[in-house]
Amino acid sequence: MSHTYKEEREKKRNKLHDELGVDPYGRRYPDVEHIGDVRARCERLGIQAGQIIDDQAARVAGRIMLLRSFGSLTFVTLRDATGSIQLGISKKAIGNRWPVAKLLDLGDIIGVTGRLGATQTGEMTVWADNFTLLCKSLRPPPGKWHGLSDVELRYRHRYVDLFANPEVRDVFRARSQIIDAVRRCLVDRGFIEVETPMLQPQYGGAAARPFVTHHNTLDIDLYLRISPELYLKRLLVGGLERVFEINRNFRNEGISTRHNPEFTMLELYQAYADRDDMMDITEAMTAAAIDRIGGGYKRPFGEHELDFTTPWPRHKYSDLLAEYAGVQMEDVAAVRSKAAELGIDHADKDDAVVINELFERAVEDHLIQPCFVYDYPAAICPLTRRHPDDPNIALRFEAFAATMELGNAYTELNDPAVQRANLERQVAGEGDQTMAVMDEDFLLALEYGMPPAGGLGVGIDRLVMVLTNSPSIRDVILFPLQRPAGKTEPPDEQEARGDENAKREQET
RNA sequence: GGGGGCGUAGCUCAGUCGGCAGAGCAACGGCCUUUUAAGCCGUGGGUCGUGGGUUCGAGUCCCACCGCCCUCACCA
């Protein structure tokens, strides 16, 4: 390759530094005004086409997104976090800075002072009287029209995705607002936020395979947590009556549009409450998040419109099974027959496991609108209190939207003997090592006494998905896990690294 | 892990039956003080994901591998 974009820009950078005495990487540029605010000011002033208002100064900074050059006059579209605005940079107004202006490229970051005005076509414009190069970009940005659409490059080079595709920033801004709204909602209800171990000597609180790591000094294996549940319940024992944690869980399972190996989970526990209180909190948190990001309670998601207006419909698990699978939950023979009909391998599985697989296969695809599904088979709910009238039913619900499980809640089990029996059954469970070993300290805590409580887990990533109309969980996680890149890096980078390796080999 | 699809210039994409690897934008050189994806003239730019194979000849056909997307399984 005779030349590259990078080399072309490096020549400009060197010329700026060596011949024009300009620092290509700038420095502090204080007292800038948000471009969004400048635009608002222009609107208020009602500037007429062709007018320049001498006493309306502006000072902005951002990245050059578009350049239109007319010899001695250049129009720049400058963008910051709040929006974009046109700059007019003319040789006449800039004077001896003009040679620097001619070396500006798409993607450069500059600061500008000037006066507000409008061009002959009425476009609001900052007419520059000075500008400062704050960072010379050495890489060409993606095309100005199509942006960056290759999903692999978008995830691997998210920074490019973010500045090239403004709607991506909107999603992550919404994510921040959603989390903030959820957090405030809980704090306002008297919850305190806590942090419990991510490195756990034993894992538990969910059925999933963990990541294993090792602590060198202690010389022990540790697990990246699959759930904070057993620690948060210890806090209930300790008298922290309303606690929540928003943090990462790690599950060593498959990756899909709705699963990332690390994902953000909200878990909360409220003493003296129960499952039904958790439904109210789920609705309240979601409503708070929607109020915060705007757009109303009826929201598009793919082909559908999801209606988050509260209260959400509440469906009994067994009723849905009857409706969509055509079987009564208690009729084990019918359940197994239907499961076999749907191709579910059920021979060696517990009744409740088969029921749940049938539910997942036959029912979940129908759960488009936000809703709660309650009263789960007890055998798949080892941490949940039993229904007082039916020991085969657990006081659990899951919240669904767009066929995805958004949340999971229990009336928590606080009987240490029942809890021990349930966990022993899990540990002994045929071939299902995922529930792992007994957490004796957790059981000890229950023996000291845990107040009756409601507990709730909400998959934050999925909540963000349904509220931002994002079809893939990777669209709401800034850096989703990718296999290490092969040849996706620019070739000159690889050459550079190869050269370094060669040098290192020569030196040794 | 199974099934399906995709990978061509910096970006977005064409590439027919196997016959000289293309376009727009971007870049470089030139003209241009009111453009809105500015325009006009000119120029350069390719490991066609990687490696094999078939063939006189492969971006194209075959095989293997790598990566990504969708889907199923597992899970939330």
Image (tube, rainbow, N blue to C red):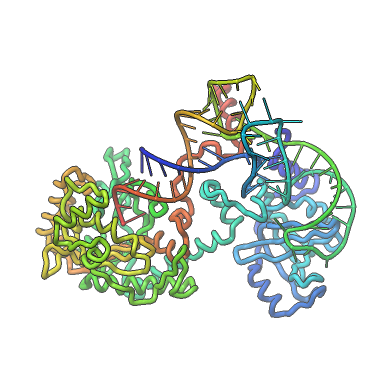
Q: Residue at x 18, y 61 (%)?
A: A377
Q: Residue at x 56, y 48 (%)?
A: A150
Quadrant of the image for the C terminus of chain A?
Answer: top right
Q: Position of residue A16 (x, y in %)?
A: 76, 47
Q: Residue at x 16, y 44 (%)?
A: A430
Q: Position of residue B66 (x, y in %)?
A: 47, 35
Side of A406 where A325 appears, left or right? left
Q: Position of residue A131 (x, y in %)?
A: 75, 60
* Residue A240 seen by the camera: no
Quadrant of the image for the N terminus of chain A?
Answer: top right
Side of A264 where A156 appears, left or right? right
The foreground one among A146 and A26 is A146
Side of A424 where A171 appears, left or right? right
* Residue A291 seen by the camera: yes
The foreground one among A340 and A43 is A340
Residue A334 occupies which quadrant of the picture?
bottom left
Q: Position of residue A138 (x, y in %)?
A: 67, 45
Side of A88 where B54 appears, left or right? left
Q: How many marks?
A: 0
Residue B64 occupies which quadrant of the picture?
top left
In the image as oriented, which residue stretches furthest toward the left? A417
The foreground one among A221 and A6 is A6
